[in-house]
Amino acid sequence: MIYKNNTNADIERHKARLGLTGDVYLINGVHIESLASHKRLIPESTATTIEEAEQERLAYEAQLEEARRQAAAEREGEEGLDGDD
């Protein structure tokens, strides 16, 4: 969800604590970034708006989740190979 600057008091408190300014996105209730902090997190970002940054972050999180899923599947497969054969 995108929060425009100075439209939500709770978000403004979080932004102040985190040192963020301007519009921000909030993903899964835990990932909050401004356009500037988003570009630090994802240096290859091509986003020029907070809306584009939010979409990049959603894709980024999906890639991380897929990588975690694959790693878990590989570990599971390796554990099966170490069985009592």
Image: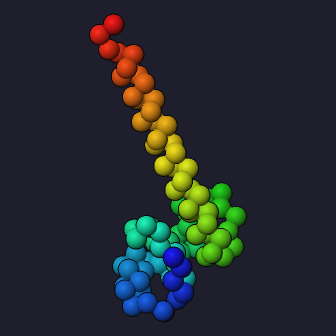
At x 58%, y 69%, the residue is 54
Query: Across the whole image, how many numbered discs are drawn on residues?
Result: 0
Within the image, what quadrant is residue 80 found in? Answer: top left
Residue 32 x %, y %: 46, 72
In this view, the residue in front, 37 or 81, is 81
At x 41%, y 83%, the residue is 11
Decide if residue 35 is in sight here: yes
In the depicted structure, whether residue 22 falls above or below residue 78: below
Residue 22 x %, y %: 54, 84
The figure's colour scheme reads rainbow
Residue 70 x %, y %: 49, 37
Outermost residue, top side: 85
Report the side of 76 relative to 52 (left or right): left
Decide if residue 42 is in sight here: no
Q: Considering the image in quadrants, where does the C terminus appear?
A: top left
At x 65%, y 61%, the residue is 45
In the depicted structure, whether residue 50 falls above or below residue 59: below
Report the side of 60 relative to 13 (left or right): right
In this view, the residue in front, 68 or 34, is 68
At x 56%, y 56%, the residue is 60
